[in-house]
Amino acid sequence: MPLPAMVFPVSDGRQSRLLLEQLVAFDTVSRTSNLSLVAFIRDYLDELGVPSQLVYNDAGSKANLWATIGPDDCGGIVLSGHTDVVPVDGQAWTFPPFKLTESDGKLYGRGSADMKGFLACVLAAVPTFLAMPLRIPVHLAFSYDEEVGCLGVRSLIEHIKKQAHPPVACIVGEPTELKPIVGHKGKLAMRCHVRGAPCHSAYAPKGVNAIEYASQLIVKLTAMGIELRNKPSDHRFDPPFTTVQTGTISGGNALNIVPAECRFDWEVRTLPGVDGEQICNELKHYAYQEVEPLMRAVQADTGIHFEPLQNYPGLLLDQNDSLAKFIALLARSSDFSTVAFGTEGGLFHQAGIPTVICGPGSMAQGHKPDEFIEITQLRECDAMLSHLASGLSSEEVLKKVLMC
Ligand SMILES: [Zn+2]
């Protein structure tokens, strides 16, 4: 169905670009506080008469921001984005990373694509949302610490769940070149610490070799990965099955000492619906039942310990879902696909809020030196959000497309 004609002309991108310049100037690498950026956004919204709520971390050094525009007697559409960016350390930047620089139709700066470009477009659209007779509200959900394991958004989702009227849908504006993305894999990452017992290597059997016992666990993981290939596959994902891999390992001090410590980091990338915890428990079971007793038979104070690093669920929305169709209409693209990178979308989806990933820019530029966003992508995102404002103001659209 066609969307009603837009009341407002599509922006020329000046406002979103100006806001992007301001957002990029805040160094919000995940290890630093995002409070000054959040204060900037809160002040911007205040000036427009939009109240916002902050959900802080335990230390009070970072905050999520939540704001609602439109009626408060029903749930609306969440526009979700993260305020943190990845570090620039060790990267060879031609452009200053925290000063937005235009060159050749592109805007360079850390976070321009991932994902301050979307935040800028959303903020630029607020006056349009305010001016339109929205039938259901737009919610802004801006998080911290996405880049280090989707940490901040968890308390934000708890905050959202307490709202009198829970949202009906969510758009996560990670860079997809404005193609609606309906799925990604989940991820569970763990660090495994193996504590052995050292001794002179000439008496190796009297010690507990942490590297060798860690190797047994890694061999087990490899075997589990091979088994997972034989489970039902889903060809919407590449590779079409759940994968397991060990990424780093360290341990030992010298060849003539039986190593006392070894640790390795491993991850499982799950198809949506596959429980990463269950796979983790299989390894833990093997570690505690098969491997640890062998170690403790030699020396009692040895053992294996698992430390969680990251855990977020996968996302998969049926492309025939009314939300998916609605976003496709807004984005003028029905190229439904999946992406390899993870997002906060899995957590929104898990909380019962149907979610699509759709935002400006490309992840091909994300996390890299000289990250950029095409100016045309900002304009197209501005247009998408104007269409959203029109759609949410139309009873017909809401009834037919969002069924609310
Ligand atoms: Zn991102």
Image (tube, rainbow, N blue to C red):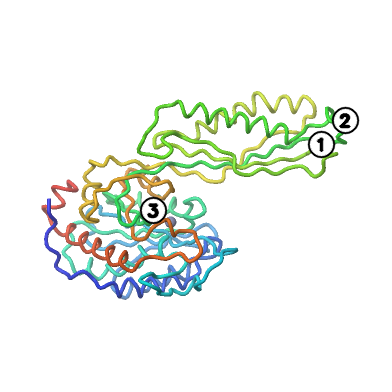
The residue under label 1 is: 258
The residue under label 3 is: 159
Say above or below: 139 vs 181.
below
Question: Residue 300: x percent and y percent?
Answer: 77, 29
Secondary structure at numbered mark 2:
helix
Residue at 25%, 62% (x, y): give it: 385
Report whether residue 376 is seen.
Answer: yes
Q: How far apart are marks 3 and 1 (CA)?
A: 50 Å
Closer-to-camera residue (307/101)? 101
Question: Residue 44: x percent and y percent?
Answer: 35, 73
| Crowd around label 3: few <14 · some 14–19 · many ≥20 (10 Å) | some
Question: Residue 156: x percent and y percent?
Answer: 41, 54
Name the image quarter holding residue 217. Answer: top right
Say above or below: 90 vs 287.
below
Report whether residue 122 is seen.
Answer: no
Q: What amino acid is labelled 1 in the image?
A: Val
Foreground label between 3 and 2: 2
- Disc 1 + disc 2, Cβ < 8 Å: yes
Q: What amino acid is labelled 2 in the image?
A: Tyr
Secondary structure at numbered mark 1:
loop
